[in-house]
Amino acid sequence: MIVISGSPLQLPDFTPKYPPNSVERLLLVQMSESGKSYRFDSPEQLRFELQLRSAIVDASKSLSRSGLRFEVFHKSECNPEYWNRSGSGGFRLKEGASPAAAIRDIFKNGKKYATECATAMVIVYFGALLNVFGEEAFNRLFPSIYLMNWHGLPSLLKEVGSLREVADILPGDRCYFRNPDVDPKTPEMQGENVIVLTDGKYYGHGVGIAGAEKIIRLLNLSREKDSQQSAYFVENSAGRPNFKRLAAAYGTQTAAVQPSA
Amino acid sequence: MNSEHSKDYSDLDRIRIEEGAEKCRETFGEVLRRSPRQAAALLNDDRLMFTTLYILHLQRPHPRVQRYLSPRNMIAVGIALQIRNPRTKRADALSSGNESVQSALRWILDTGSPEEIQEDFYEEILDVAVSVLLRAYKDADALPPAVGLLFSRNRNERCIHDLVWSLFRFHDPRVLRLIAERIRSANQEDAALATELLNIEELGLSGKGDRESRYSRYIRWLEENQPYLYFTDESFQCSSNPAFADVDLERKYLQREPNSCERQPLVLAKEEEKGCLNSFKRLSCRKQRALSEYSQRLRSRNIQAWQKWLRLPVDEQLRAAKAGSEEEK
């Protein structure tokens, strides 16, 4: 159920704004049919979450087409025009570089970059936020960026670094496939971070866009000898940004760029 | 490395340590030009440190010495090749159940970690050595050097995530104790990393006091909870703030020790216990913690009183626990 300012949402009033089969429409249906109450302070707050979740799905698809390569942190690579590679293998925004241009470069020149799956998830979030906020607001909100799995997340995004119990897995969620018997020689295959898309598909860096079965099959290829336990999807668990806080930041930022009456 | 032998360097190590890596390469190059067999003999010295083999032969392999290398060095070369080109099909240089591989990996860790070279390739070899030693060879003696390596690498701001993963994947409270030693380190980076890895703040153990008292608080907590401790398999790959180990509060509440450090579901035969546990599960985490702690204290003092307490409705258990805790103060 969706509840806005204490009243249940009348779905027919809201859905026509979104095309059939759009991510937003699917989200509205899934949230309305859920046993959990999704509460919002205003219709704008709900619209923002739908918009950002849809942007996360789009950014995942774009990143999967970008040519970004999979490598462990010890072999990570970045475009030195925008990023400095840290001793840990993360990417730190260069002084003077535009955060928006640097993020956009990863989507445009993915072949110049190589990293692990978690960092790719963070890149997806930044790509989505850039699309929603626009360049000016994005640069103001994220003046310094460090890309290295879930470390160094800006406070506006810190919640995506933790998996929490959730009632429903929704498009735009960050989830995890665990590979408990992974071969000790390939720690990078201990699991796969994914973004939930639609139609039972996920985006995982290194795997691309695939269903759960394929992701599990690929992880299982990197198990230790005589393993008895398959890789699996971690159920009822997702990482989500704090959409309400981001919506508030979005409201503040857009108000800041509106010409005064 | 054994401290008794630390001064007993091989010729090449002595040159590297006293005159630097470049001089060492130069000297080795001169010998190699004269006689590859003699150059290999220098590398095959039992006392040679991995660091020296790395700078002389792994950074840039010399095909002319290859055929004269000792089995230990051949294994190290195989491992390095496997790491450099993981996608190339070749025999697994790290296959488990092979004593000579384990011994070579220990040599790599023991002699390669004290002076780790800050290069990705070098660090990756060390990471894999730790991971395979702990998981495939269950080599608990590798824990102290691996923990040492973790902290020194952290001080150099290099990548520690795979080392952390390997250590906690070992599922052994000795890892927690080794890391806990660093809580009382004078080095702030060491103390901060230990605090983070052991979840000291989330456990409510940071509190006031100096390093020693923080360390003592953690050790007391560990001793109390070790029987119910399990490893979560969380890692930096899936979380920014993983809880690597946690306490099974349900088992602690019912005082049922598991037989390993993995989370095992409780199998209860008595209806009374099942009802008790169901009520316990409905409590907040804070209340669960309070009840499980009281349960442990009461049972250690008076087993009959504990059995009687456990039969009370959960609300009364909570009241008794509150009153009991206040009396203890």
Image (cartoon, coloured by chain):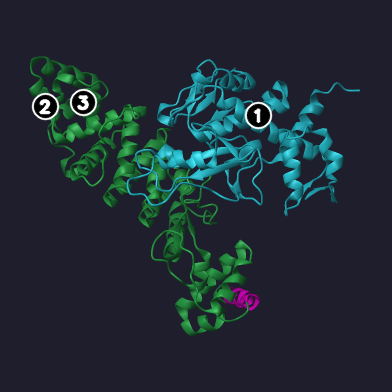
Say which residue appears at 25% left-offset and 36% top-offset.
Answer: B93
Tell me the amino acid under the disc marked 1: Asp
Tell me the amino acid under the disc marked 2: Tyr
Look at the image and tell me in which quarter the C terminus of chain A lies.
Answer: top right
* Residue position for label 1: A58
Rendered green, the chain in question is B
Residue B216 among magenta residues: no
Asked if A252 appears above or below B187 in the picture, the reply is above
Where on the picture, by quarter, is residue A126?
top right
Q: Where residue B283 sits in the image (x, y, percent)?
A: 63, 66
Whether marks 1 and 3 lie on the same chain:
no
Real-space Cα separation, disc 2 to disc 3, in angstroms:
22 Å
Extent of the magenta region:
B314-326
Asked if A193 appears above or below B41 in the picture, the reply is below
* Residue position for label 3: B16
Q: Colour of chain A?
A: cyan
Chain designation of label 2: B
SS state under label 3: helix
Residue B68, numbered label: 2
Q: In terms of sequence position, does the residue under pointer 2 or pointer 3 come before the other?
A: 3
Q: Where residue B108 sits in the image (x, y, percent)?
A: 25, 37
Tell me the amino acid under the disc marked 3: Arg
Whether marks 2 and 1 lie on the same chain:
no
| Front residue of A206 and A251 | A206
